[in-house]
Amino acid sequence: MGYKPEEGFWGHWDMYAEQLMTYVLGVASPTFPIDKKMYYDFERKKGEYKNIKDIIYTYCGTLFTYQFSHAWIDFKNLKDENGIDWFENSIKATNANRQYCIDNKDKFKTYNENSWGLTSCLSPKGYISPRSKT
């Protein structure tokens, strides 16, 4: 995920996140394709929220990770060899995110049916994500 001359390379992605497009572009490269095993090897943990089931979820639950690759690749009506439909997965994750905000509107003043879209951000306490305990 990064490089510093004094430290070298650090971090890596090994589960679903915004790097989805890098795998797709790498596998589809007409000049220097990567082995499609790289795409199929990253972890795909599934979860649910209420009646929204089988969401392949991201590490910290941030909404942008479900949307980012879609800004560059049209996944609509596409499934991979395992039947994963990333477009539908992002719809389910977005609906779960909204429902979570509706369900927790009494706990947080900015959560409600019209104010949602949880993502990581800088706060007075530093960098936080929706799954942070702070």
Image (cartoon, grey):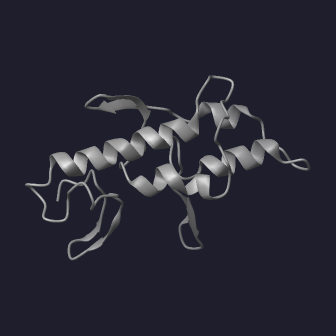
Outermost residue toward the top?
82
Q: Nearer the viewer, residue 72 or 132?
A: 72
Left or right of residue 44: residue 105: left
Residue 58, how many percent across, how many down? 43, 44
The count of marks equals: 0
Name the side, left or right, on which 132 lies relative to 26: left
Q: Is residue 74 above or below residue 89?
A: below
Residue 59 appears at what percent x and percent y?
A: 40, 46
Position of 78 compared to 111: left or right? Answer: right
| Residue displayed at 52% across by 36% down | 88
Tell me what residue is drawn at x 56 percent, y 64 percent.
2
Residue positioned most to the left: 106
In the displayed image of the protein, which residue is found farthest to the right? 31
- Residue lying furthest bottom in this view? 124
Task: Give the vertical position of 128 relative to 83 (above or below).
Answer: below
Residue sitting at x 60%, y 73% = 5
Quadrant location, the N terminus: bottom right
x%, y% of residue 93?
40, 42
* Residue drawn where x is 67% and y is 57% of the image: 72
- Residue 41 x/y as whole percent: 61, 31
Quadrant where the C terminus lies? bottom left
